[in-house]
Amino acid sequence: MQPSAAKMSKKASQKSGGLLVLHGPNLNLLGAREPEIYGRETLADIDRRLAATARVAGVVLTSFQSNHEGALVDRIQQAGREGLGFIVFNPAAYTHTSVALRDALAAVKIPFIEVHLSNVHARERFRRHSYFAEIAVGTIAGLGSQGYDLALAYALTRLTGGRGA
Ligand code: DQA
């Protein structure tokens, strides 16, 4: 019997192995928001650069930002259905509060790197705890927007079967 079209397309997308860059609340304000902490680049600048790097490597990269916890949970669940291969995630303030986002990542079992622009360990005490660090492949904090580039470089080696996988 022929597999149904729905099954076929699901199977095809599961093999897609694409990459999701996920940004949490207030990161839409990058560039204007506390630039002494978060830098002067906008989120669009960062996303554009990451997309260009992924394109060169032949990997499909999608970026998504939301100020809403549920929307981020939905996007992670969607990534699971799409069969994406890796997530680069800056959960922003939800880093320190969100069991729901951690559970979503644990449910889809997509490997991810937690990224923070600022050094969360050198700031207020409440920023030192992350609900994600324990289940992340790794965490990058304090390197500004370069942290995203470094996380992406690692993800690309994993997705394309290169060194570091
Ligand atoms: C952040 C650090 C978080 O503590 C903060 O709530 C953010 C951004 C960072 O990228 O440095 O919104 O994740």
Image (cartoon, grey):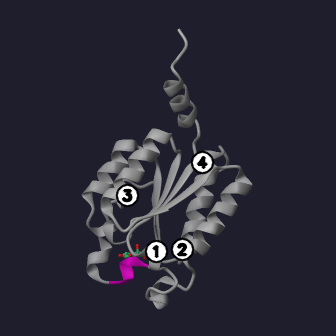
Distance between mark 4 and mark 1 Cα atoms: 28 Å
Vertical position of residue 151 compared to residue 111: above or below:
below
Residue linked to disc 1: 28
Extreme front residue here?
A: 5
> What crowding class fits label 2: few (fewer than 14 Cα within 10 Å), some (14-19), or many (20 or more)?
some
Residue 124 relative to residue 118: left or right? left
Distance between mark 2 and mark 3 Cα atoms: 16 Å
User: Is residue 121 inside the magenta stretch?
Assistant: yes
In the image, what residue type sits under mark 1?
Answer: Asn
Contact (Cβ within 8 Å) of mark 1 with mark 2: yes
**Quadrant location, ligand no. 1:** bottom left
Distance between mark 3 and mark 4 Cα atoms: 24 Å
Extreme right residue here?
A: 56
Residue linked to disc 2: 43
- Where is residue 99 drawn, in percent x and y? 25, 57
Q: Which range is magenta? A: 119-123
Mark closest to the chain's N terminus, 1 or 3: 1
Residue linked to disc 3: 72
Residue 96 relative to residue 53: left or right? left
Q: Residue at x 46, y 54 (%)?
A: 112
Mark closest to the chain's N terminus, 1 or 2: 1
Q: Main secondary structure of the magenta part?
A: helix
In the image, what residue type sits under mark 4?
Answer: Arg
Distance between mark 2 and mark 4 Cα atoms: 24 Å
In the image, what residue type sits under mark 2?
Answer: Leu
Mark closest to the chain's N terminus, 2 or 4: 2
Front-lying residue, 4 or 105: 4
Q: Quadrant of residue 126?
A: bottom left
Residue linked to disc 4: 158
